[in-house]
Image (cartoon, grey):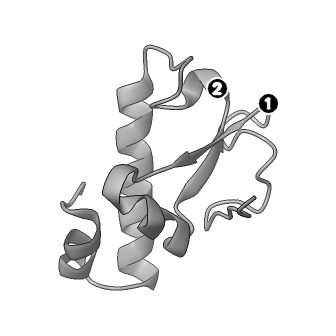
Amino acid sequence: MKRLWSVFTSDMDHCYFTGTTPVERHHIFGGSQRAASEKYGFIMPLRPDMHPNGAQSGANAAEIDLKLKRMAQEYFEANCGTREEFRRIFIKSYL
């Protein structure tokens, strides 16, 4: 099993927002950017009802998804590269 990590937390066993368990590990950018999410640590432990594309996602899933994408882009631009580089990897800007 792959060991997923996050630039946002060292505690992958508790929800980033609530501190509760159980969690699902959410790739902030999925699909063709899933591997890039893993490379840059854009993984977030979330309660199942907060997981934007999880089977139990709640009413605010789209809001949570956009918040996480913006957090990841802000981190990338501060620590990894330019906005243009971010767009090349993750398709578009969320800021």
Q: Residue at x 46, y 83 (%)?
A: 79
Expressed as whole percent of the image width and height from the top left, the position of residue 50 reads 56, 27
Q: Residue at x 79, y 41 (%)?
A: 14
Question: In 3D space, how far apart are the residues under numbered discs 2 and 1 (Cα atoms)?
Answer: 7 Å
| Residue 81 vs residue 22, the one in the foreground | 22
Q: Residue at x 80, y 55 (%)?
A: 11
Q: Which residue is mark 1?
A: 22
Q: In the rendered view of the protein, which quadrant contains the N terminus?
A: bottom right
| Residue 30 vs residue 19, the one in the foreground | 30
The disc placed on residue 48 is 2
Whether label 2 touches label 1, CB < 8 Å = yes
Residue 86: quarter of image: bottom left
Residue 80: quarter of image: bottom left
| Residue 67 vs residue 28, the one in the foreground | 28
Q: Secondary structure at mark 1?
A: loop
Q: Amino acid at mark 1?
A: Pro
